[in-house]
Image (cartoon, coloured by chain):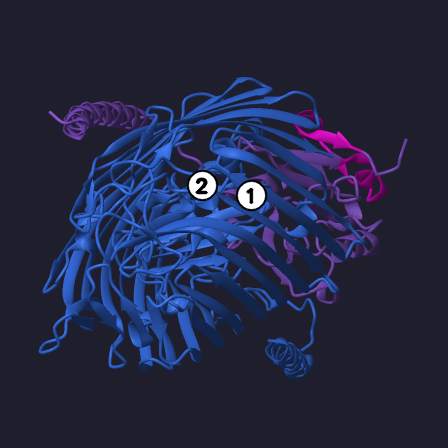
Amino acid sequence: MNGFICRWGVATFLATCVATASLAQDGTVNSLDPPPVNAADDDVDSDIDSLEGLLELSLEELTQTRVSAPALEQIVTTVSRQESTVGKTPAAVFVVTQDMIRRSGARTLPEVLRMVPGLQVARIDANKWAISIRGFNSRYANKLLVQIDGRVVYTPLFGGTYWDAQDVMLEDVERIEVVRGPGATVWGANAVNGVINILTKHSRDSTGALVAAGGGKEERAFASGRVGGHVNDELSWRAYGKYADRDNGFTGPLSTFPGLPPLPGRVSDDWRQGRGGFRMDWTPTCSDEVTFQGDFYNGTVGTRQVLPLAHPSLTPTVVPGVGVSDFDDRVNGQNVLLRWTRQLGEGSSFSFQSYFDRTVRRAFTFSEDRETADFDFQHRFLMGRNHNVIWGAGYQTSKDRLAQTAPFLFSSPLRRAVGVVSGFVQDEITLLEDELYFTVGSKFDGNSFTGFEYQPSGRIVWQPNEREAIWGAVSRAIRRPTRTADDLGILLLSGDLLLGNRNIQSEDLLAYELGYRSQPSESFSWDVATYFNQYNDLIATAPVPMAPGVSTFNNNTDGHSYGIELTGNYAINDCWRLSANYSFQRVELQNSSTNRDADATPKNQAYLWLSGDIRCDVQFDLMLRYVDAISFEGVPIPSYLELDARLGWQATDQLELSLVGRNLLDNHHPEFIGDPFTGDIGTEVERSVYGVATWTY
Amino acid sequence: MSKQKRQQVRAGTNRHLRVVRAILVLAATLSVCFSASAAFAAQPKEHTLKVAYLYNFTKFVSWPADALPPSQGAFVIGVIGENPFGQTLNKLAAAKLAQKRPIAVRYFKSLADYKPCHMLFVAASTPPDVRAAIIRQTRNQPVLVVGENVGYGVEGSTVNFVLLEDGSIKIEINIDAMNRRKMQANALLLKLATVVRDQGEE
């Protein structure tokens, strides 16, 4: 491992040197290209209409004029890898701000994500979540790209995210951008159904000390702390640490599998995790910025698995040949990231980013040690007056070591390093200034699984005026096969053997999207997005002919999905606001041996959030959410309606006290069941109430 | 009926009730949404409004006589930093006169390219050290420096825009800087603006 880190460090250093040297000759720091000056522009557009209107106003009237659309002016970077605003973005994007995180009272990332329209969040047990966008949900949901500060956190083992290992200091999150629909043209494989991009604050915006601590039912005890400051005008820093101890879920009727009787005892899926990290931002010149950050975590997560063999450590069940394991999985990881951004002039900049990420997971049936090194370069420039071009190149290598700790899961080979070389280019073309933009581009990559892949997209956005935008997009995205589909062998609960298939190809998506957003008045904004996704060559399992009891992966499943997502925000008055979202989605598959992906998608989902200040120092939030019934692996899971609430009191300038209640309408309710694939057992979500004291200095 | 069956039946009834409740909640939300969308109030973009302000400054600020020789040359508005106006400022120049003369707009790559103008807009993207250098370099010249970074007013910019949370724009006028540059703001402008002094002045 040390050798690997060393090589990553040397490679990062060399790449930085080369980039510095090659760009040193145009080191005209702070030089700005002359903006296009065209004196007479005869075309009359809405811009000059409103300018003409404004020029007629008296100075007094001007001071009473308010500028447009804060909702549409919200900054997003995920869609095109550069700063833009929601209003101009040709994609279905939702931004979770720091204020929304604080007011939600949530203590984990999955709980924060429940507010996002079109996103499916279902808790499987106390520490496992199934999270996906636009369908295909399961613990191993694999069509989603999740990033924290530019670091990809889904595992190449199965292409999904272990949510029990992903956390940040929630108080230091700047915003979470969620893009529904493909983001593959700029981000590459796995950004098939959406992208979740978690961005933490610049360290100059998180100076001072903050301590938050609390506890209660379910969230037994938690504490987090951060200090930050400036060394001088150029260098700022912060460091944080946090710890949480969380209770187990409710062992209900679904805490078993079809055909099995209720299992003995309670599921001990309680979990504990500690985490720490730092971030430093250095601005050596007015056009350079260097960010260095890192995190580490360590925890144990309780897991119950039902397994098909007698093993000395398994608890026998009444069903012969089937045993239960209650095991504390150990998870830990470390990562460091270095990013250098230089402004070259108006509309032009480049950035170089490199990170090293190590994750370790020791479960009952297997262990995974993974080391990932990633290098990424991107450059943006203006070409003429109408082309905003961004291109980039990257290399990622991910090396793992799998080990079977019990005879249920094996891998051949046990160690594998997977490399991906990639490049992308995208051009945002201004067809009509401030009105009509067309974006076209493609990602190209070569990888160890399937060779060369391309993922193009075309997007158009029309802003007839400052308060409305209509956008449409057609894009292709692929999901690469993973270690699981390639190399693994798993002994299933049925006694069948599931074997990897090295001939497996990428899954293919062609997505058509259309959306509209509007801010008709200062107090009201809304948007709607619709999509039709055509999937080909989906990876699914099927029995191997002539080999009874053996199944494998193939690409024989096709299908499509469609849906609509509606979001609205209404400021009732200066103190109270109401936001709501509704999504309808449907997945239909052909040739599939199982319909689990289609049935595990709730048809209807709704969220209603009333948020307000009772007094200037008392905040109150009420969140109502509805999720339709689903069925997973043939097991029906009823719909649910739940209520979360938070009361916050700013007791002094430095101390805030809050009381949070979650899932208040039921003692307990199921949201998902375990996964027969790996034998994980699910539990139900219980009502939770906890208090938090936050002290800032 | 077994206990499990009873639970299932109860869950079923609860489920229907919840669906009905959820639909009611949604209907209420949507009706609120649609009633609100009736109110359609026009709002300009931030930098369009700022151009309108710049135009008004040409009317409500007086320059020393030698800065504007009679019937000679254009009224020059300079922009330094990443141009936030798009074509809007050029459209103003094409449509209006300032101090009874045509408006010329100049965009400066950097401070090194700076040529004297009557009004200099310092865009938000300009780094702090360049902003300070602009104040130093034009300290006693009759240039109406207009900034849009918080704190630039007390740092010596004659005028500074501050965008407030409610979407309105606050105008700061630094009277020390105006006096140094021998320029005067009209009483109406001073009344509507927030008057500030140089940092550290008593």
Residue A361's x, y, as percent? 48, 61
Residue A572's x, y, as percent? 41, 22
What is the quadrant of residue A250 in the picture? top left
Asked whether the viewer can see residue A504, the reply is yes
Q: State left or right for residue A267 relative to residue A495.
A: right
Is B114 drawn above or below residue A9 in the view shown?
above
Q: Which residue is mark 1?
A: A170
Residue B175 lies within the magenta run = yes
Residue A557 lies within the magenta run = no
Tell which chain the image draws in purple: B
Pointer 1 chain = A
| Secondary element type, mark 2 | helix
Precedes in sequence: disc 1 or disc 2: 2
A530 or A199, nearer to the observer: A199
Tell which chain the image draws in blue: A
- The N terminus of chain A appears in which quarter of the rendering? bottom right
Bounds of the magenta segment: B174-196
Residue located 20% across and 24% down the image: B14
Asked whether the viewer can see residue A45, the reply is no
Q: Of the residues shown, which amino acid type is indicated by label 2?
A: Val
Q: Which residue is mark 2?
A: A112
Is A451 drawn above or below residue B158 in the view shown?
below
Residue A154's x, y, as percent? 43, 62
Pointer 2 chain = A
- The reply to whether discs 1 and 2 touch (Cβ–Cβ < 8 Å) is yes
